[in-house]
Image (cartoon, grey):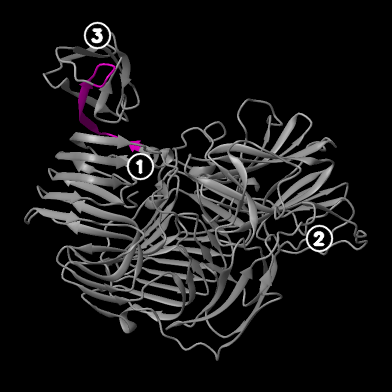
C-alpha cells in the first residue's frame, strides 16, 4: 500500500500485506556493463539416457560472470543437483555476464522400462562423531548417526499421512518430487516417531507453512506466514489460550528454496534457516520423549507450500553450532537518553545536540520518533532497535553499526506493552530529510523502506536490507543513496515533471558499478543513486495475489509531463502521477507479467514488463477510465471521477477522496487503505476478496444493485427489500427487471458490520461493505 501516507499507526497495525510505493518519478537507467573475468564453464551429467523413474546428477563449475542460474534458480558457481525428469527434456545452465547471458545445455533422454527405486526412507548407519562441533555463526549439517531417516519423495510418500490438500507432486523445474500442500491441510510423518532430536527440511512457499513437533501434550511450532517467522509453544508454558510468539528475523522469499534445521535438546530448542540462527529458546522443562513431526499449510485456496528432502534423527544428542536466539528475546538495553527500560512510549521528538548510543540489548519505540537539530542516534553491535516511523530533520544522524533495525508492528503485544504505548506501524520506515545522514554498515534491516529527501545522504554497506515483500530505498530531490556490498529488496526512482528517463535492460540482479547521474541517459533529475557490488533480489513474487502490492526489484513513479522510454526492462510497479488539470484520460489493456509494446501515458514501453502493479494517483477533478486491465492500483484524491471496467484491482488506496469511483465487472483482490478524511461514493459491480483493509476517519457510500429471481432464475418484480442495521431501516421495491438499488453508508465504526436483509417473498440474507455486487436473491 502507499508508503507515504501510512500515518495513523492503527492503519498499519491492521495490515499484513506489504505497503506499496507512493509518488516517484522515473530516472533514466541502464544496466551496468562492467566486464566480468574471462568465462570458463563446465556443465556435465553422469548420464544422458535413463529409464523412467531413474535420476541423474548434474554438475557444473563456472569461473567468471556475475551470477549462475540452473534453469531459473540462482546457484553457486560450483555445485551439483539430483534431477529425475519424467520425460525427455533439456537442462540449461546460464551465466550472467552483465551485457549478455552465456548458456550451456544438456539433453536428458528418458525411455525404456520403469525402474523400481529404493524405499522412501533410508536409515543411515553412520557411527556418531565423538568430537563436539565447534561454535560457529552459521550452521553446518552435523554428521549423521544411527536412526537417521531421510525422505526425498522420489519413489513415493510411504510413511507419511497426507490430508486431502497435500500430495506428492513433480517439481515444476523437473528436479524431482516433493510434497505440496494447497490451502489448509497437514502432512504427518507416521513411520518415524520417538525421541526426535534433529529435523531438517527444504521448503518453498506462496502461503503459510508451519512445522509442528508434538511432544506429549505440547506442540512446538515454527510458523512461516505473512507475519514473518514465528516460534511458539502450545499450550503456552505460562498458561493462557493465546500462543506467545517469539519472532525470528529472516527474510523468507516467496517461491524460493529455503532450508530449515531444528535442534532439540533436553534444555533448548534452536532453529536455523539457510544456516543462520533465527529463533529458539531455553526450555523450562524437557520435551516428552515420544515426539511426532508434521507440516501444516495455512493458505488461501490458490496458494501452496512445498516440502522436500526431510531428515529426521532419533535418540542422537545433536548440538547446534551456536544458540539461535531472536533479538526479540533479548533483554531490554540499558537506560540511555529518552529510553527507559529499553523503550520510548508514545510519539517523541528529540532535538538539540544530543548523542544517544544504544548498546547490548533490545530497544522498542511505541510511537513515532523524530530526530531534529544535531541529534545522533547510534545502534551498536548486539543491539536491536524496533521502530514504527522514524523521521530525521535538519542535521540529525542515524548510525547503525553491526546491529538490527526492525519493525515494531509484528512484535507488538498489547498485553505486555507499557501503559500509553501506541499501536505501531506493521512494517517500519525511515524518512530522512534536509541535511540528515543515515549510515548503515554490517547490519540487518527489515524495514519496509527508507526515503532520502532534501539533501540527505543514505549509505548502506555490507548489509542485508530486504524482507519477503519490502526493503526498498527511494531517493528524492537532491539526496544521494550509495549502496555497497549489500542486498536490497527494491529501488524506487521518482521521475519529476519535465524530466526525461531512458532505460535499457533495467532488471533485478547484481550491479558491480552503477552511478545514476553518470551512467544513465537522464535529465531533470537532481538526486543520485550509486550501487557497487550490490544485488537487488530476484522478483519471485507471484502475480495475481495480494503480494502484487509488495515491493521488489525496480519501481518507477512517473509524472504526467515527464518523458520515459523503457526497453527490455522489468519493473515491479509503474505508477503515474496525474495532476488535477487536464483532459479526460483512458488506459486500456494493461497486463502484468508479460512484455508490452505500448505507450502508457508518458511512458513508452518496448518489450518491457510490469510484474505487479499499474498505479494511478489521480488529483483534482480529473476523469480517468481504466479498461480491460490487470494489476490496477487506483489512488484517487480530491473530487476526481474514476471508472474501472472489466479489470482486476490488486490495491485500492483513496486519500482525501470526495469524488466517485465506478466499478464495472471488477475484482478487487488485494489490500486497501481508506484513510485521511475520505467521503466518496462507490458504484457498480464489484467482487471483493480483500485480505486486509485499513479504514480511518473516512466514510463511503456504496450503491448496491439487488436482483430478485425465482428458482429458475427469472426476474421477480414488485418485491420489497428491507435492510436493517441497529435502528436504521432502508427499503426498496424491484422494478419490471426484478432490480432495485439502495445506497448504504459505512464509516470507521461500522464498516465491518452487516445489514440484515429480508424480502417480501421470504428471502433472508446479509449485506456488508465486502459483499459482492450485484446481489442476486433467490429462494
Residue 270: x %, y % from top left: 73, 50
The image's mark for residue 292 is none
What is the spatial separation of the Cα atoms under label 2 and label 1, in whole angstroms? 45 Å
Quadrant position of residue 293: top right
The front one of 215 and 384 is 215
In the figure, 749 relative to 627: above or below? above
Residue at 23% in and 19% down: 709
Residue 142 x/y as whole percent: 81, 60
Horizontal side, residue 541 vs residue 639: left or right: right
The front one of 251 and 696 is 251
Disc nearer the start of the sequence (2/3): 2
Region rendered in magenta: 694-713
The residue that mark 1 highlights is 669
Q: Position of residue 402 (x, y in %)?
A: 59, 64
Nearer-N-terminus badge (1/3): 1
Residue for badge 2: 142
Q: Earlier in the sequence, mark 2 or mark 1?
A: 2
Q: Secondary structure at mark 1?
A: loop
Q: Provide the secondary structure element on which disc 3 rests.
A: loop
Residue at mark 1 to residue at mark 3: CA–CA distance: 33 Å
Task: For label 3, count other residues whose C-alpha is less than 10 Å away and answer few (under 14), some (14-19) or many (20+).
Answer: some
The relative height of residue 633 versus residue 482 in the rendered view (above or below) is above
Between marks 2 and 3, how big is the CA–CA gap? 71 Å
Q: Per the image, is 357 magenta?
A: no
Tag of residue 761 = 3
Amino acid at each position: 500500500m502507499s508508503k507515504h501516507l501510512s500515518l495513523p499507526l492503527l492503519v498499519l497495525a491492521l495490515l499484513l500485506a506489504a505497503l506499496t510505493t507512493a509518488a516517484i518519478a522515473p530516472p533514466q537507467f541502464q544496466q551496468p556493463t562492467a566486464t566480468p573475468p574471462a568465462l570458463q564453464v563446465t556443465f556435465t551429467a553422469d548420464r544422458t539416457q535413463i529409464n523412467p523413474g531413474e535420476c541423474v546428477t548434474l554438475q557444473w563449475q563456472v569461473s567468471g560472470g556475475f551470477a549462475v542460474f540452473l534453469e531459473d534458480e540462482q546457484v553457486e558457481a560450483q555445485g551439483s543437483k539430483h534431477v529425475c525428469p519424467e520425460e525427455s527434456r533439456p537442462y540449461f545452465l546460464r551465466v550472467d555476464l552483465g551485457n549478455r547471458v552465456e548458456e550451456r545445455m544438456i539433453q536428458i533422454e528418458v525411455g525404456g522400462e520403469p525402474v523400481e527405486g529404493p524405499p522412501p526412507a533410508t536409515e543411515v548407519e553412520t557411527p556418531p562423531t565423538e568430537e563436539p562441533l565447534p561454535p560457529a555463526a552459521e550452521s553446518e549439517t552435523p554428521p549423521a548417526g544411527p536412526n537417521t531417516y531421510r525422505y526425498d519423495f522420489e519413489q513415493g510418500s510411504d510413511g507419511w499421512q497426507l490430508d486431502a490438500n497435500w500430495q506428492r507432486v513433480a517439481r515444476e523445474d523437473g528436479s524431482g518430487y516433493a510434497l505440496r500442500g494447497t490451502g489448509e491441510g497437514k502432512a504427518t510423518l507416521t513411520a518415524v516417531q520417538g525421541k526426535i532430536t534433529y529435523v531438517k527440511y527444504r521448503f518453498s512457499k506462496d502461503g503459510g507453512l508451519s512445522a509442528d513437533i508434538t511432544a506429549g501434550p505440547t506442540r512446538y511450532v515454527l510458523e512461516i506466514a505473512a507475519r514473518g517467522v514465528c516460534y511458539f509453544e502450545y499450550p503456552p508454558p505460562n498458561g493462557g489460550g493465546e500462543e506467545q510468539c517469539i519472532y525470528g528475523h529472516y527474510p523468507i522469499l516467496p517461491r524460493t528454496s529455503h532450508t530449515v534445521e531444528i535442534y532439540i535438546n533436553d534444555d533448548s530448542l534452536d532453529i536455523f534457516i539457510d544456516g543462520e540462527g533465527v529463533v529458539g529458546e531455553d526450555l523450562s522443562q524437557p520435551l516428552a520423549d515420544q515426539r511426532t513431526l508434521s507440516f501444516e499449510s495455512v493458505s488461501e485456496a490458490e496458494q501452496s507450500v512445498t516440502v522436500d528432502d526431510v531428515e529426521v534423527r532419533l535418540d542422537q544428542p545433536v548440538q547446534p553450532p551456536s544458540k539461535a536466539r531472536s533479538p526479540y528475546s533479548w533483554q531490554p538495553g540499558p537506560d540511555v537518553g529518552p529510553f527507559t527500560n529499553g523503550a520510548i512510549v508514545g510519539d517523541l521528538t528529540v532535538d538539540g545536540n544530543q548523542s544517544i548510543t544504544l548498546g547490548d540489548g533490545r530497544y522498542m519505540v511505541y510511537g513515532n520518533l523524530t530526530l531534529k537539530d544535531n541529534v545522533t542516534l547510534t545502534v551498536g553491535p548486539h543491539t536491536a532497535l524496533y521502530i514504527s516511523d522514524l523521521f530525521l530533520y535538519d542535521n540529525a544522524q542515524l548510525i547503525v553499526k553491526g546491529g538490527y533495525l526492525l519493525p515494531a508492528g509484528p512484535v507488538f503485544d498489547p498485553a505486555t506493552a507499557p501503559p500509553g504505548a501506541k499501536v505501531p506501524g506493521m512494517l517500519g520506515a525511515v524518512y530522512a530529510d534536509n541535511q540528515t545522514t543515515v549510515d548503515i554498515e554490517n547490519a540487518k534491516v527489515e524495514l519496509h523502506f527508507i526515503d532520502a529527501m532534501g539533501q540527505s545522504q543514505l549509505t548502506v554497506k555490507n548489509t542485508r536490507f530486504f524482507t519477503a515483500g519490502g526493503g526498498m530505498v527511494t531517493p528524492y530531490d537532491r539526496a544521494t543513496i550509495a549502496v555497497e556490498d549489500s542486498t536490497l529488496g527494491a529501488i524506487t526512482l521518482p521521475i519529476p515533471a519535465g524530466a526525461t528517463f531512458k532505460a535499457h535492460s533495467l532488471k533485478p540482479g547484481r550491479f558491480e558499478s552503477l552511478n545514476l547521474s553518470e551512467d544513465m541517459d537522464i535529465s531533470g533529475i537532481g538526486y543520485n543513486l550509486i550501487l557497487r557490488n550490490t544485488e537487488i533480489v530476484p522478483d519471485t513474487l507471484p502475480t495475481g495475489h495480494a503480494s502484487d502490492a509488495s515491493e521488489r526489484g525496480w519501481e518507477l513513479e512517473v509524472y504526467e509531463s515527464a518523458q520515459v522510454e523503457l526497453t527490455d526492462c522489468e519493473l515491479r510497479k509503474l505508477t503515474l502521477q496525474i495532476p488535477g488539470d487536464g483532459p479526460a484520460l483512458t488506459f486500456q489493456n494493461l497486463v502484468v507479467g508479460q512484455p508490452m509494446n505500448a505507450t502508457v501515458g508518458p511512458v513508452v514501453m518496448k518489450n518491457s514488463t510490469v510484474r505487479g502493479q499499474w498505479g494511478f494517483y489521480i488529483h483534482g477533478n480529473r476523469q480517468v477510465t481504466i479498461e480491460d486491465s490487470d494489476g490496477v492500483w487506483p489512488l484517487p484524491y480530491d473530487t476526481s471521477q474514476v471508472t474501472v471496467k472489466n479489470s482486476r484491482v490488486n490495491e485500492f488506496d483513496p486519500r482525501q477522496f470526495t469524488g466517485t469511483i465506478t466499478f464495472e465487472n471488477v475484482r478487487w483482490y488485494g489490500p486497501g487503505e481508506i484513510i485521511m478524511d475520505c467521503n466518496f461514493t462507490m458504484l457498480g459491480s464489484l467482487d471483493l476478496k480483500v485480505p486486509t483493509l485499513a479504514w480511518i476517519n473516512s466514510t463511503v457510500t456504496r450503491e448496491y444493485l439487488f436482483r430478485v429471481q425465482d428458482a429458475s432464475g427469472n426476474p421477480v418484480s414488485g418485491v420489497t427489500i428491507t435492510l436493517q442495521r441497529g435502528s436504521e431501516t432502508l427499503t426498496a421495491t424491484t422494478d419490471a427487471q426484478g432490480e432495485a438499488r439502495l445506497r448504504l453508508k459505512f464509516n470507521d465504526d461500522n464498516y465491518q458490520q452487516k445489514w440484515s436483509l429480508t424480502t417480501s417473498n421470504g428471502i433472508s440474507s446479509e449485506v456488508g461493505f465486502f459483499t459482492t455486487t450485484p446481489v442476486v436473491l433467490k429462494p
